[in-house]
Amino acid sequence: MPVAEPDIVGRLQRREPSGFLLASVRGVGQVDLQPLLWTGVLILAALWSAGWRIGLFATLGTLISTATAYVLRVDRSNIALGLQGYCGCLTGIALVTYLGHHPATYVLAVVGAIVCTLLTATLTTFLSPYGLTALTAPFCLVSGVMVLGAPSFGRIWHGAPKAVSDPTSGDTGISWSDLWHAFFTNVSQIFLVDAWYVGLIMLVGLALAGVRVFLYAAAGSVMGIVAAWALGAPTAQIAQGIYGYNAVLVAIALGAVFLTGTVANGVYALFGAAATTGLTASLTSLFKPFGGHTFTWPFILTTWALMAAVPLLPRLRRSA
Amino acid sequence: MPVAEPDIVGRLQRREPSGFLLASVRGVGQVDLQPLLWTGVLILAALWSAGWRIGLFATLGTLISTATAYVLRVDRSNIALGLQGYCGCLTGIALVTYLGHHPATYVLAVVGAIVCTLLTATLTTFLSPYGLTALTAPFCLVSGVMVLGAPSFGRIWHGAPKAVSDPTSGDTGISWSDLWHAFFTNVSQIFLVDAWYVGLIMLVGLALAGVRVFLYAAAGSVMGIVAAWALGAPTAQIAQGIYGYNAVLVAIALGAVFLTGTVANGVYALFGAAATTGLTASLTSLFKPFGGHTFTWPFILTTWALMAAVPLLPRLRRSA
Amino acid sequence: MPVAEPDIVGRLQRREPSGFLLASVRGVGQVDLQPLLWTGVLILAALWSAGWRIGLFATLGTLISTATAYVLRVDRSNIALGLQGYCGCLTGIALVTYLGHHPATYVLAVVGAIVCTLLTATLTTFLSPYGLTALTAPFCLVSGVMVLGAPSFGRIWHGAPKAVSDPTSGDTGISWSDLWHAFFTNVSQIFLVDAWYVGLIMLVGLALAGVRVFLYAAAGSVMGIVAAWALGAPTAQIAQGIYGYNAVLVAIALGAVFLTGTVANGVYALFGAAATTGLTASLTSLFKPFGGHTFTWPFILTTWALMAAVPLLPRLRRSA
């Protein structure tokens, strides 16, 4: 890491509030699997630039998830890396996006962020025998359950949520403007935001985390565009980043985090980025009948599947 | 346990029929996670009071499941605790409720009870590495599969089953009568029965198992009502126990069985009871498109998730 | 095995092309869980007799899956047994059947066959702690995801696929002609082929693998017919093999491969064959709302469930 980081573990153990706040900022960056503090700062700034509601709920969710982990005495070095905050961050954004800005949504965001921390522990128990991590699955589970159940309850439901984009039909011609919009919105859609400048700021944050992280994020975004275009996906969806955000995450996860930097591993990471683009359409069709949401499931399932395969494929190698 | 229990393991090993019958009675009580013989007796009486068909199919299912385990040489002390009978008990009730009282339903109840015992072994294999138990999942799987497949088959299908209550819309005002009905039907709905006096008898059975069991069952029922009301669930559903039976089970499981008796664990158990109430609506919406049934899935998923999280949350502690 | 087999492991290690080809032929036979070379030869011949498109895509899929395993350095003795080819074989057939014979389908068959090999490794990682194998699950996952996602993409979708037979309604009277057709199509439907002579050739291939394999395949087919008739399934579906192909696979797997040859194990295998017949209807109903396909899921789920139960049921015994 290019910048010296403060001793967050020590501050947490000495119960200094700054330790808690720094761990939370890192939590925002961990959505993109990066523990660097400045990456978290830039992504947080990008979220506030997307609108104060997005920024506020992202901040609230991250703080509550991290605090829950602290109260339940989760391992301090794990908290310090930001690994207890990122699912709360995404859950806050998802709830205000799909349920609207109401008092009840604040209550649900707090409860959802608490449950995210619990499910992170649950999934760690189930996955660690296989050397896998929870990724953003706690977020997908909590937000999915809450958005699915919400219409049943008079006190938290205020009319139909923002319609889910239907990525399954539309025009397939593509222009230069579509392409560069897609390149950046692929990064911002990880946080459910459709705005190219938000993606741009986030990409700067990822660049701070290192050249390899930046290159794989960019390559993943390109791969998502190419795969979606080659398959014949509707251009409007590609330009909004609907087809590429999972490819960005898979490329970062496999290319820059979980595997060593060999050529074979790089090919594997980009193959995964392309595969997750196709999987996005399948999962969206799967979830449609019962009103479920795709969220980052394609990234999670692809990364789990490809990482679990590695021990039996000696050509590939996990990083230490 | 306040009452001396007979030596059921010894009787099973000596092949005395009384050992088999006593193990089966305990099986009925194990639906509520209680091995005490008298708890089983009272719950069985409550089921017969709900109607001879319910009582007969509950008895048949429990006997067949327990006998299957005996024939396949399942560990005798496990059978003696009633752990091989409770899923057959619920499966019998579910099949006569959803498929009607026909000769074919008897055959299916026998086959279903046999498969329950097999799936109890299956799930024990998959879950024991994580220190989890099968709970009522074999029942939910067997009954879910049978009810889902039944309309395809001319010889077992006799018209539409009893309509599933739609817990997703309706009036939300609540009266004193709704409240006390809900308190008791939350207990009887565990067995798919909507009758307050059945719940009352069962609650007496749970009280025999100990003060802590009774208090958590009652607190779980109250928590289910409060959570459903706070979320804005339709009153008719709350009064029928549709929203609270999973909360009762979660409160008993986490509060009185699987965790030690600390304050933090108690808060965790009641938080789980509230969470499972919300989850009930989500799963009902999830199952609706393909005609699936919620059964006790919310209890199972909540209990598995919260128990699997405990090893990583040092503030909480599993019981020995 | 009645016939001497060539040293395929040695040929693979010496990089002789014949080793690769022989391993691929075995891969075709492994769809029916048989490693004998001549079983693979006869099944491959049966597939080409079903039409050149079926034969070509089955061959292509098997070769690509096996080659992928070779390139990624999967254990050579595992490749030599044909265990890396059978899912690609079925995926090729499924894609040309459901997406039609177009240039894009060739590309998808190649990609699908590659992913099959990756998912075989994934599932081996997840299942080996329980002593289970991947069976045909990689095929079901890859083909299911591709067929589900295909309509979203303009460049790979060419109109509605062949309609799935609706196994949930129709006449239930049965004739001698229905019965013997069903007996053979139960074997050919494993490969998505509805033709009695294809099933006949395959059954000859299975007979070469040994008397026990042949007897359980035949008994599974009979059990599937009896169970479907007893439940009251529509005759047209029974005659096309829709209800019985999973029963054939379960009977072979439990009766002739994974369990020892005791009477109790034989009863268990045939009980499983009957149970999987009922499960076929449930899964078809489950998949209907989102356009999913049943494929060999009933066989996979039944075999996993029954095999995982065995260690806790001392009356039954796994083979070494």
Image (tube, coloured by chain):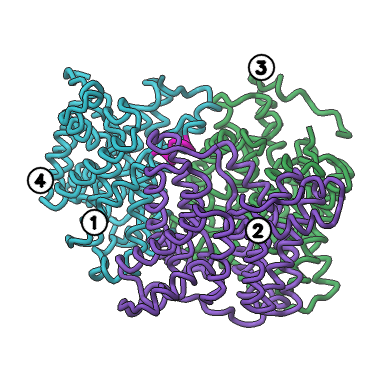
Chain colours: A green, B cyan, C purple
Q: Are marks 4 and 1 in contact (CB under 8 Å)?
A: no
Q: Are marks 1 and 2 in contact (CB under 8 Å)?
A: no
Q: Residues within 10 Å of mark 3 (few under 14, many from 20)?
A: few
The chain holding disc 1 is: B
Q: Earlier in the sequence, mark 4 or mark 1?
A: 4
The structure residue drawn at horizontal position 33% and vertical position 58%, both measured from the top left corner, is: B146
Residue B166 to residue B19: above or below: below
Name the foreground residue: A179 vs A126.
A126
Q: CA distance from mark 4 to mark 3?
A: 61 Å
Check disc 2 and give the amino acid type. Tyr
User: Would you say residue A140 sits in the magenta stretch?
Assistant: no
Check disc 1 and give the amino acid type. Val
Q: CA distance from mark 4 to mark 1?
A: 24 Å
The residue carrying mark 4 is B49
Q: CA distance from mark 1 to mark 2?
A: 38 Å
Q: What label does residue C86 carry, if any?
A: 2
Q: Secondary structure at mark 1?
A: helix
